[in-house]
Structures are given as C-alpha cells and as structure tokens.
Image: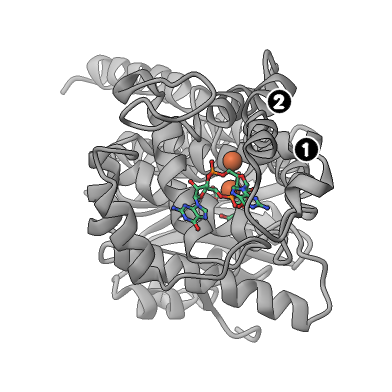
Amino acid sequence: MGRRQELEKRQSLLARFGRMVAAETHLDSLLTIIAEEVRNILGADRCSVFVVDSYKGELWTKIALGMEEKILRIPLGQGIAGFVAKTGSAVNIRDAYRDTRFAQDLDRITGYQTRTVLAVPLRGRDGKALGVFEVLNKSKGAFTEEDEGLLRILATMAATFIENATLYEDLRRSHLETIYRMALVAEYRDQEDTGRHLRRMSRFSGILAVGMGVPTPEAEDIRYAAPLHDIGKVAIPDVILRKPAKLTVEEFEEMKKHTVYGAKMLANAESRLLRLASKIAVGHHECWNGSGYPYGLKGEQIPLEARIVTVADVFDALSSKRVYKGEWTVEDALRYIEDKAGVLYDPKVVAVLREKFGEILLAREEENRRMMEDEAAGLQQHFPLRPKDADHQLPKSA
Ligand code: C2E
Ligand code: SIN
Ligand code: SIN
Ligand code: FE
Ligand code: FE
C-alpha cells in the first residue's frame, strides 16, 4: 500500500472509530469496542484499556480467559500500565521481558507472551488520569513514533466517551436504585420477606427474556422494570391486602385494580424503563386464554414483556409463603405452571422456564443467600448492584 493510501485508510478507520464509540453509552461495551477498533487501527495483536479506580488506588481492565471475561485489578504504580497512569508519560517498549517495569503476572494469568508494548495515558477533560491505553505485539516490528501519535489521538477521543459513559452509568445506577426502592414500597406491606420476591422475580424475568430471544439490552430492561409490576398495590387497603384468608368476590374485584392503578402511576413517564414497567403492571395478570384481568386480552395481544413477567411472578408467588398461603416446592410450582401452559400462560415462555430451570434455581438460591448475608450483616436490604469486584488480584508489591 502506498503512503497516501495508508493515510486514507487510517483516516477512515478514525472516522469509523468516532462513530462507533459515540453510539455506545454502556461503559462495559464501550471498552470492548474501543479495544477492538484500536487493535485494528494499529495492527496490534491486543489492546487493553485500563481504567483508574481512584477510590481504591487501582487500575482495572477486562481480560479474556478462553470464553470468559474477567476483571483484573492492579495497584496504581505497578506494571507498565501502572507506570503510565502514575507518571502520565507514554511508554514504547521493544522487549517487555527485559523491561523491569513490566508485570509478568498478567501474562502468567492469561498465558499470553507480550513482546512489544505501546502505552499512553488517558486523560479526562480536566487533565486528571482516567486510565491507560495499551497495545501489545505489533504484527510487524516495533511500534513507531507515528503509532504513538495515532494512539494519543485515539486516547483523547476515547477519554471523552469514557467520561460520558461513566456519568451515564452513575445516572443509570441511581435511576435503577430509585425504581427498585419504589417497588419495595409497594411490596412492604404485602409480604414478610420484603424484597426477596422482587429480587428473585426480577432475575427470573431477565433469564426468561433472554431465553425468549429478547436481545440483551431489552432483556435487561425487562429485568429492571419487572419489580414494579405490583406497585399499584400501594392503593389497596390493608384489610384486603393483608387478609390471611381467601378474598371475597368483592375484595378480589378491588384487588384486581392494582394492575390499572400501577399502570396509571407509571404511565407517560419520560423514562423508558418506567413506561415499560407501566405496560408490565397492566398486563401481568392477563391470561393466554383471555380469562385474565383487567382487559381479558388473549395470546399475543398481551405484550411479550408481560407474558414473561407473569410466569416469573407466579412461579415465585407459588414457591413462597404468602399471608394467605403456604409455600409450594419449586417442583410443584413448575408442574402447576406447565399444566396451565397454553391455558393461563404463554406456552413458549413456559417451555423456556423448563429449559432454564437449573439457571432459575441457581438465581433463586443466589438471591436468597444474598439477602441472608445482608440481614446477618445488619444491612438494610440495599440495592443489589454492587461495584465490580476483582476476579483476580495482583499482589500489591511489584
Ligand atoms: P400474589 O400473592 O403476588 O400472587 C400473584 C399470582 O400468583 C396470583 O395472581 C396467582 O396467579 C398466582 N398464585 C399465587 N398463589 C397462588 C395459589 O395458591 N394458587 C394458584 N393457583 N395461584 C396462585 P391473582 O390470583 O390474580 O392474585 C393477585 C394478587 O391478589 C395476589 O398477588 C395477592 O396479593 C392477592 N390475592 C389473591 N388471592 C388472595 C387470597 O386468597 N387472599 C389474599 N389475602 N390475597 C389474595
Ligand atoms: C448497571 O450498572 O448499569 C447495570 C449492571 C447490570 O446490568 O448488571
Ligand atoms: C432488582 O430487583 O431490581 C434487580 C436486582 C437483581 O436482579 O440483582
Ligand atoms: Fe399482581
Ligand atoms: Fe408479584
């Protein structure tokens, strides 16, 4: 390729890079896209993006181990990435194993053999260190000064987007937390194990959605909107909601209104998640054969999100204790739901429940265990999203 063509190719790759990273607001996916694009542009074998966790004084990155992705954390100041983060200067190394700064532990964990390394700092708008961009093993020879210039440009572009995604993620997190706490309010009077039902049915809804072929971002939305399905119960009087016996016909008529109350509380929201929650609230007691409430919708007239949440909700309601009923075994609950497939429940969703039953039971165990640990630690049942923990930790001393 001529020099001119080479330049043109790099320019078009740069433009593509800008478009792709601008479109992604999830920090996780953003880092993956950036690493892949930068690797291509520089003709390197690998690209790692290290992000500073100033709270812990560490850098973290995602590494691929076979099919799995792991989070790896290294102390600031350690390794080449740590050096670049600390000093703010770029590093270009021809033979990593002869450089004392190089942390071989990383290669040992990944089974990778690093030869050449080019690393530049990632700086935020105010100049503070956000992380480090590292490319490894150029396909031919060592990294050049031109490569370094290019990596600096890419780092500047990426920094802006990483900063934005971080802000967005904070917003998203507080939004999710608010939603979850709203749902807790409704469930508070209803059940002794406040929160458990919500966490479990939320997880089940996500698993069922993925099994139904819903793409990941939308499946995640269903997972986080699902806990609001019974928010309308806040408007149901205690004498009905907490009655430790069967409801009269009139009482059940009143009870049924929790679907439309919930939908009204959530309707026309700005938030996409709240609008989805509204759809779920009104649809979660509709039945496949049209015998449900409030509108008696049938089959695919019922939104898919609601059909999914119904199965998650009923499975968990059956297998838990309620003021008005004891708990069934998970096998009995599954059997009941399978018996009503195509009658009360979408047969496809029920098939997924069967198919993913192992995963569902694991999620159920996990949530139960988590709540018990939190209670033992004297914590309020706090929001379940926790900061990422390290899968691997390098020793603090280099
Ligand atoms: P929930 O307790 O969250 O139950 C959700 C759904 O799970 C129920 O919707 C029903 O489809 C299913 N489910 C729960 N327990 C049983 C059961 O023992 N047998 C069967 N076959 N299905 C069960 P449903 O029936 O529309 O009830 C909606 C809500 O009305 C319930 O939410 C609960 O809050 C209340 N409710 C229903 N029946 C009674 C009752 O007999 N006494 C009281 N106090 N509340 C009731
Ligand atoms: C988030 O932190 O924005 C969501 C993480 C998750 O989906 O588990
Ligand atoms: C939720 O209950 O809002 C989601 C929590 C989780 O599934 O970890
Ligand atoms: Fe309900
Ligand atoms: Fe429920």
- Quadrant of the image containing the C terminus: bottom right
The residue at 45%/47% (across/down) is 205
Task: Give the structural element (helix, strand or loop) at label 2.
Answer: helix
The picture places residue 283, in percent across and down from the top left corner, at 50, 28
Residue closer to the observer: 192 or 141: 192
Label 2, residues with CA under 10 Å away: few <14, some 14-19, many ≥20: many
For this view, does 153 lie left or right of residue 110? right
Label 1, residues with CA under 10 Å away: few <14, some 14-19, many ≥20: some
Residue closer to the observer: 188 or 42: 188
For this view, does 108 lie left or right of residue 200? left
Whether residue 383 appears in this view of the structure is yes
Residue closer to the observer: 50 or 374: 374
Work out whether 325 lies above or below 273. Answer: below
The picture places residue 360, in percent across and down from the top left corner, at 39, 62
Instruction: Report if the beta carbon of the residue with label 1 is closer than 8 angstroms to ligand 1.
Output: yes
The residue at 45%/35% (across/down) is 217
The residue at 34%/16% (across/down) is 12
Work out whether 130 lies above or below 4. Answer: below
The picture places residue 257, in percent across and down from the top left corner, at 66, 28
Instruction: Report if the beta carbon of the residue with label 2 is closer than 8 angstroms to ligand 4.
Output: no
Marks 2 and 1, how far apart at CA: 9 Å
What amino acid type should be assigned to the residue bearing mark 1? Answer: Ile
Q: Nearer the viewer, mark 2 or mark 1?
A: 1
Badge 2 vs badge 1, beta-carbon distance below 8 Å:
yes
Numbered badge on residue 261: 2
Task: Give the structural element (helix, strand or loop) at label 1.
Answer: loop
What amino acid type should be assigned to the residue bearing mark 2? Answer: Tyr
Work out whether 47 lies above or below 329. Answer: above
Residue topped by disc 1: 236
